[in-house]
């Protein structure tokens, strides 16, 4: 399996992120999520529909870990909330 690229942990800035998993049922169904090896923060959960779907579920879990609001969006939101009413 190729080495996946994770964004830094948003809580502790650590880059030691790995995919953790657990069985969801008694068969093939498993849940996956990105997890920080330093502070234990967890990303979004993705589970496989089938044994063949595991690879996609892992990719989904990586995507969920790596999803961040863009800095620009954050600035827009901040401006909205810090602009006094009626000042425009
Ligand atoms: Zn962390």
Image (tube, rainbow, N blue to C red):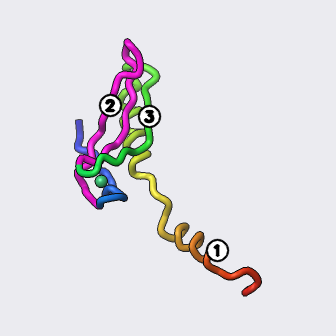
Q: Front-most of 59 and 20?
A: 20
Residue 28 x %, y %:
37, 17
Q: Residue 23: where, in percent of width, then height? A: 36, 22
Badge 2 marks a residue whose secondary structure is strand
Q: Residue at x 25, y 57 (%)?
A: 14
Q: Label 1 belongs to which residue?
A: 80
Marks 3 and 2 close (CB-CB < 8 Å): no
Q: Is mark 1 within 8 Å of ligand 1?
A: no
Which residue is the site of mark 3?
A: 46
Query: Label for residue 21?
Result: 2
Residue furthest bottom as drawn: 87
Along the horizontal axis of the image, is 38 left or right of 56? left
| Helix, strand or loop for disc 1 | helix
Q: Quadrant of the N terminus?
A: top left
Q: Residue at x 49, y 64 (%)?
A: 70
Magenta highlight on residue 21: yes
Mark 1 Cα-neighbour bin, 10 Å: few <14, some 14–19, many ≥20: few
Magenta segment: 13-37
Where is residue 76 shown, x and y percent of the image?
Answer: 58, 72
Q: Quadrant of the C terminus?
A: bottom right
Closer to viewer: mark 3 or mark 1: 1
Q: Is residue 47 above or below residue 60?
A: above
């Amino acid at each position: 399996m190729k080495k996946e690229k994770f964004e830094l942990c948003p809580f502790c800035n650590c880059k030691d992120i790995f995919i953790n998993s657990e069985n969801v049922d008694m068969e093939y169904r498993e849940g996956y999520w990105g997890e920080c090896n330093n502070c234990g923060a967890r990303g979004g959960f993705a589970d496989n529909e089938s044994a063949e779907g595991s690879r996609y579920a892992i990719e989904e879990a990586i995507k969920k870990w790596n999803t961040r609001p863009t800095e620009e969006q954050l600035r827009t939101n901040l401006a909205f909330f810090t602009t006094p009413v009626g000042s425009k």
